[in-house]
Image: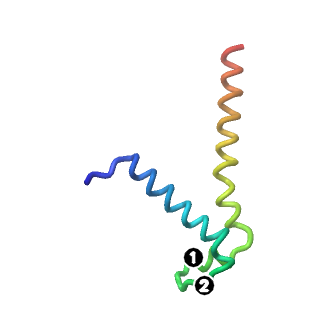
Amino acid sequence: MKLDIGHLIIIFTATFFLLASYAILFSAMLPLTGIYILDVLAQDTHYKYFTLLIIPTSAYFVIANWVGWQYYQNS
């Protein structure tokens, strides 16, 4: 089976969703796993929110920039 760009996007999106869900929701209820990366995410209190919230914030600014550019071009 050949992986194309669509499959890779879905795999990376699902992986990010699972890691972000663990970091924000499940790490408070579950004990430490023994996996270094997951334990660092569970013990962090600030940057785990930053990495998750930077994506919708960036998307907002990209869309706002595009709308502003459309107004500029069509005026």
Horizontal relation, residue 70 to residue 11: left or right? right
Residue underneath mark 2 = 32
Residue 6 % position (x, y): 40, 46
Way the structure is coloured: rainbow
Residue drawn at the location 39% of the way across and 51% of the way down:
7
Give neighbour class at mark 1: few <14, some 14-19, many 20+ (Cα, 10 Å): some
Q: Residue furthest left?
A: 1
Residue at disc 1, secondary structure: helix
> Which amino acid type is shown beneath numbered disc 2?
Leu
> Which amino acid type is shown beneath numbered disc 1?
Leu
Residue 51's quadrant in the figure?
A: bottom right
Horizontal relation, residue 67 to residue 9: left or right? right
Residue drawn at the location 70% of the way across and 20% of the way down:
72
User: In this view of the protein, which residue sits in the foreground, 10 or 55?
Assistant: 10
Residue drawn at the location 63% of the way across and 70% of the way down:
23
Q: Dots 2 and 1: beta carbons under 8 Å?
A: yes
Residue 44 % position (x, y): 69, 74
Give neighbour class at mark 2: few <14, some 14-19, many 20+ (Cα, 10 Å): some
Q: Residue furthest top?
A: 75
Horizontal relation, residue 6 to residue 74: left or right? left
**Quarter of the picture holding the C terminus:** top right
Residue underneath mark 1 = 38
Above or below, 9 relative to 23: above
**Quarter of the picture holding the N terminus:** bottom left
Gap between marks 2 and 1, in whole Å?
A: 8 Å
